[in-house]
Image (cartoon, rainbow, N blue to C red):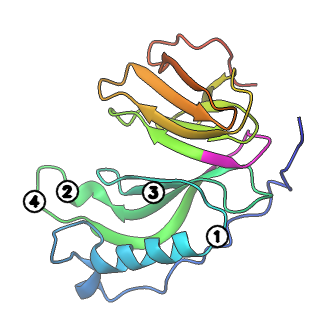
């Protein structure tokens, strides 16, 4: 299998925006946490890398997940966009933080093409051009399992609404259906 990845030491080329005026950053007319400043930052982040394939947001946790940021990057990234503590049960809108890289999820040997978050937000799935899917715990950001079986890059991932089934589509024109690993059912552990 061809290896694409450069050194893991290279971090994201995306640059966070300058600090926003707190009166503007507290919310938006739509009541979404982070408001206009977060929306503009996400647009800049998505416009920067020419080969990013996937992005997933976890609004309740104030996180944004992005696939590889270029053809020599083999990691997915977790960005903290706002502090969700003001949201749960308080009616608050959350506080916008300086958008920052929270975690880099390394392990794939080729660019990450697809992402999916389980409905309960406990698992993040990353599909790669290395023909594998990695299952990550969102509690501690460790890889729990590596799923193999595709004969091409994994281009799409979807978790069923009940969280029990993971669907993956790859460049080899196959769709695989498997248990989503919530019960520890996956066959290959991360090294």
- Name the residue carrying label 3: 64
| Mark 1–mark 4 distance (CA, rounded to whole Å) | 35 Å
> Nearer the viewer's eye, disc 3 or disc 4?
3
- Name the secondary structure under disc 2: loop
Indicate yes or no whether the magenta region holds residue 111: yes
Give whichever of discs 2 and 1 has the lower sequence position.
Answer: 1
**Residue at 85 percent of width and 50 percent of height:** 4
Residue 118, x across and y down, in percent: 40, 33
Residue 90: percent from left, percent from top: 11, 56
Is the residue 33 above or below the residue 67 in the image?
below
Q: Name the residue beneath numbered marker 4.
A: 91
x%, y% of residue 83? 33, 61
Callout 3 environment at 10 Å: few (<14), some (14 to 19), or many (20+)?
many
Query: Which residue is at 45% across, 12% downward?
Result: 183
Dominant secondary structure of the residues highlighted in magenta in the image? loop
Q: Give the secondary structure at mark 1.
A: loop
Q: Nearer the viewer, residue 33 or 176?
A: 176
């Amino acid at each position: 299998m061809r290896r694409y990845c450069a050194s893991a030491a290279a971090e994201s080329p995306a640059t966070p925006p300058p600090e926003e005026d707190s009166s503007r950053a507290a919310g938006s007319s739509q009541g979404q946490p982070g408001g206009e400043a977060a929306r503009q930052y996400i647009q800049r982040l998505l416009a920067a890398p020419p080969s990013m394939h996937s992005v997933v947001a976890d609004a309740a946790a104030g996180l944004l997940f992005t696939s590889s940021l270029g053809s020599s990057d083999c990691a997915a990234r977790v960005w903290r966009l706002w502090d969700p503590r003001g949201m749960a049960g308080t009616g608050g809108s959350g506080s916008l933080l300086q958008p920052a890289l929270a975690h880099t999820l390394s392990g794939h040997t080729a660019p990450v093409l697809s992402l999916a978050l389980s409905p309960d937000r406990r698992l993040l799935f990353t599909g790669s051009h290395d023909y594998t899917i990695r299952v990550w715990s969102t509690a501690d950001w460790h890889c729990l399992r590596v799923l193999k079986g595709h004969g091409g890059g994994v281009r799409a991932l979807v978790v069923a609404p009940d969280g029990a089934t993971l669907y993956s589509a790859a460049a080899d024109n196959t769709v695989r259906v498997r248990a989503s690993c919530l019960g520890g059912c996956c066959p290959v552990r991360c090294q």
